[in-house]
Image (cartoon, rainbow, N blue to C red):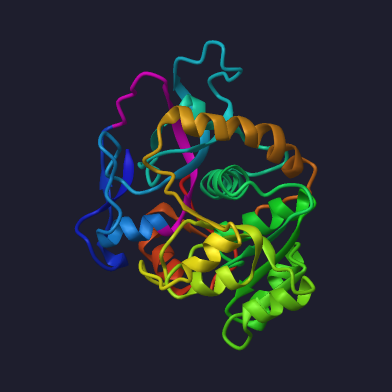
Amino acid sequence: MRAIEITQPGKPEVLQPCERPLPVLKDGEILIRVHAAGINRPDVLQRLGHYPVPPGASDLPGLEVAGEIVDGILAGSGFAKGDMVCALVQGGGYAEYCAAPLAQCLPVPGGLSAVEAASLPETFFTVWTNVFDRAGLSEGETLLVQGGTSGIGVTAIQLASALGHRVFATAGSDEKCRACEALGAERGINYRNEDFVAVVKDLTGGRGVDVVLDMVAGDYVAREIDCLTDDGRIALIALLGGAKANVDLGQVLRRRLSISGSTLRPRPVAFKAAIAQKLRERAWPLIEQGRIKPVIYKTFPLEEAAAAHALMESSTHVGKIVLQVV
């Protein structure tokens, strides 16, 4: 099969086409003929040598795919060979065929193309487990999304908004802020010339937000503490601004604040299967009703994965970047 491998840690050019044997299925896995694969920030980190491949996972990059089931034991699953599914995987997505745990597969929502469906799993699994499970965003609560026009940000804004929450989001330009608002954010905040703490406090009458979804970390954490309401929670999912923060732990104690962090890739299949079930029940109907729409910024042929990574690193995109395989 055609695939894209990381020849050595480095710049996008280290992504090179190759020929690989078809994946050998493990217990509980199915084989998907990949039509499209999503590009995600962890793929870039893996290419740079900063995101180790979990034991037993494919060394090929790619954490989400959409395509046709061609092999595997499907009894009792509700799926059949030939069905179109999208799946969260530990690796191997940048290829013509990919092995995926059956429990981490979801049907392609009605009306969506394979390219659109391939943009869903990584961000929806990540947002659900961090915003709704770990941070416990509940009815009537508010959310601040850092990086609102990233793939994660676009999903978080749309999903929380569709479920009835007030959402605010930061972005790096006025144009991107307007894009956040078009997706459902009440206010896009330009972090280059606005203080998101002051804006959030003003918009909430001094109260602050209940949950912050943070992919920046670094010196953002102290400021996020300042814009949380009492009993507020920070869900940390990436360290783009640095791994160290100087925070006022007195506030954490006095105001009962919580800071949690997680990475999804190494978690067991059973954990991800539970998320998949919640998504199928709560999020997939919203997609099929058109209340949440995939935002695809650009597609590239599989062989142009290097160009796709260069675009990802430029941070000029709004939404998802997808490799088209078929």
Q: Residue at x 24, y 66 (%)?
A: 10
Vertical side of 117 occupied by 181: above or below: below
Q: Is residue 61 left or right of residue 110?
A: left
Q: Magenta span covers which residues? A: 22-41
Which residue is nearer to you in this view: 130 or 205?
Answer: 205
x and y, in percent, of residue 270 in the image:
46, 27
Figure quadrant of residue 14: bottom left
- Depth check, front residue: 258 or 32: 258
Q: Residue furthest left?
A: 8
Residue under the point 66% across and 61% down: 230
Q: Residue at x 72, y 41 (%)?
A: 111
Image quarter in which the N terminus is found: top left
Residue 168 drawn in magenta: no
Q: Is residue 104 above or below residue 197?
A: above
For the view shown, which residue lies furthest in the top direction? 75
In-front residue for pair 29/235: 235
Q: Is residue 297 visible?
A: no
Q: Quadrant of residue 190?
A: bottom right
**Residue 166 vertical placement versus 120 (above, below):** below
Residue 20 to residue 130: above or below: above
